[in-house]
Image (tube, coloured by chain):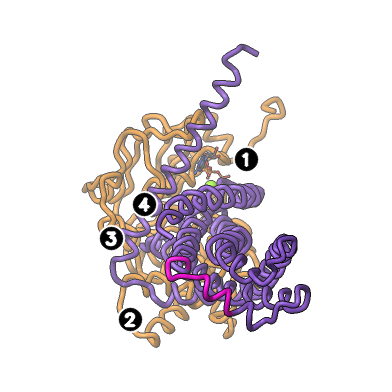
Amino acid sequence: MSVRGPFEYIGKEVRAGFDWAGGISLLLGRALVRGVQRPWGIYDVFRQIVALGIRSLPLSTLMGVFVGMALTWQFGEALMGFGAKNAVGSAAALALVRELVPTLMALTIGAKIATGITAELGSMKVSEQIDAIASLGADPIKKLVWPRLMASTVTLPLLNVYGNVLALIGGAFIADFVFDVPAEYFYETYIDELYPMDYISGLVKSFTFGLLVGLIGCYQGFQTKFGTEAVGISTTNTVVATSVAIIVFDFVLTTIFLPVG
Amino acid sequence: MAPIIELRNVYKRFGDNIIYEDMSFGVEAGETFTIIGGSGMGKSVCLKLMIGLLPYDAGHVLYRGKEVGDMNAEELRELRRNVAMVFQGGALFDSMSVLDNVTYALREHTKMSDQDMLERARECLDMVGLGYDKDILYRMPASLSGGMRKRAALARSIAIKPEVILYDEPTTGLDPANIERIGHMIRKLQKELGVTSIVVTHDMPIAWKCSNRVAMLWQRKFPHIGTPEEMQANPAPEVHEFINGIYHEDQD
Ligand SMILES: Nc1ncnc2c1ncn2[C@@H]1O[C@H](COP(=O)(O)OP(=O)(O)OP(=O)(O)O)[C@@H](O)[C@H]1O
Ligand SMILES: [Mg+2]
């Protein structure tokens, strides 16, 4: 192999990455332009919200409680070393609300939503159902992408709020039973520590993640080539793409919100 | 008279896979035009070019003299209201009942009442031979047999009463009686409503019986176009061999 081999390879990958990001942006633009035109398809959006939200409730419950418990335990152990275990509520609050709940929620529920969308739209693509929608004079972006994009953008922040409540409950449970910090005290210090900006920062994150997740899910579905095998490939790629996108955007949003908060 | 659909010097390729090179033909209003040709040569692609589901690289695809490639969203919508396509695999919407599938275009393009749509759906299902089953309207596509799905897809395409119907292998996988029925339906739509049909098929008896003209896809063009009689008398070896199903072992 020539010396240029690896560079060419990297160049190709970088270009593919840019093409992908370009395609994603184009889809977002189209979905927004066509979505805001009447009729808005409120019914379709609503149905997707119910489908995505309800189906994700068990996993969100599990996520919320366990993240709250694990983090409180970790902080409790650390703080006990300084004889400051009573501060466990204040310590856990910021990390959970600003960072862990939105991000972990997006990485699990978000990835689940995105792969679900990719698998559904991907199999519609390979069985020519997307072409069929167009051939019947309807707009596949309006009919398929718009409702899913709206639904995931609304659903993830809602589940984030729900996850925050459960994380608090999980944390209070550990504080009380493991560290002997009364649950009421944990609750008070927890809430005291939080300012509106902290909630806003968490919500903006989950809103952004919701948009990303819906967008990547739809784009990958539409990009699916031929055959059922292709659906598997694009679904796998969706997992990777959503995880990377969520982690990168989490960092970006954190740097934006830290000085503000 | 100008053709209702015309392809002029069309070029189409997917990467290195060249499908059409300088390909031309026209379809007259009211005729039944059959396309034959080997598997994987681009017959389905040809139908998709006609309603703008696939872009072409060069040349012209014209519907009533208007360039399909230049149409905006509203014009495309209008085109697709008038030119319906029956997909090779049916492409029924899995998430919808047969009724919702069949009435999809009606909901999209008209303000018909639910009752009228129901009647129209029954009528169309009757035409494709699915009328005997009273529950069919409320069944999901996954619970239908392959042949039933194919016919339900046909019903979906004719529901809006298009002026042109593109059939992609409408009879493949059907039993002889239903093949007859589809052939009969194509002729009936032509006679009673003046529908123009473009039929991709491997079923030569249907092609001879229904078509005004038959075109054969060969080497990225349609070099042989003619009435069924002309095609049957065509001396070109590729035509003769194709329509009579002659197979040479040394071709492999
Ligand atoms: N969207 C697409 N992207 C890339 N290649 C495509 C696409 N659609 C079709 N092709 C390729 O174009 C060629 C022609 O395909 P087409 O489906 O038109 O064949 P066909 O003549 O209809 O065959 P069959 O009789 O088996 O249905 C094939 O090689 C196929 O792989
Ligand atoms: Mg085909």
Whether the residue carrying mark 4 lies under 8 Å from ligand 1 is answered with no
Residue located beneath label 3 in the image: B78
Residue located beneath label 2 in the image: B112
Whether the residue carrying mark 3 lies under 8 Å from ligand 1 is answered with no
Residues beneath discs 1 and 3 located on the same chain: yes
Residue located beneath label 1 in the image: B245
Residue A190 inside the magenta-drawn segment: yes
Against A260, residue B151 (above or below) is: below
Label 2 crowd bin: few (<14), some (14–19), many (20+), radius 10 Å: few
Mark 3 residue type: Glu
Q: Which of marks 2 and 1 is nearer the N terminus?
A: 2
Q: Earlier in the sequence, mark 1 or mark 3?
A: 3
Q: Residue A17: x percent and y percent?
A: 50, 37
Q: Which of marks 2 and 3 is nearer the N terminus?
A: 3
The one nearer the camera, B14 or A249, is A249
> In the rendered image, is residue B179 in sight?
no
Q: Residue at x 59, y 82 (%)?
A: B133
Label 3 crowd bin: few (<14), some (14–19), many (20+), radius 10 Å: some
Rounded to the nearest angstrom, the CA distance separating label 2 from label 3 is 18 Å
Q: Which of marks 4 and 2 is nearer the N terminus?
A: 4
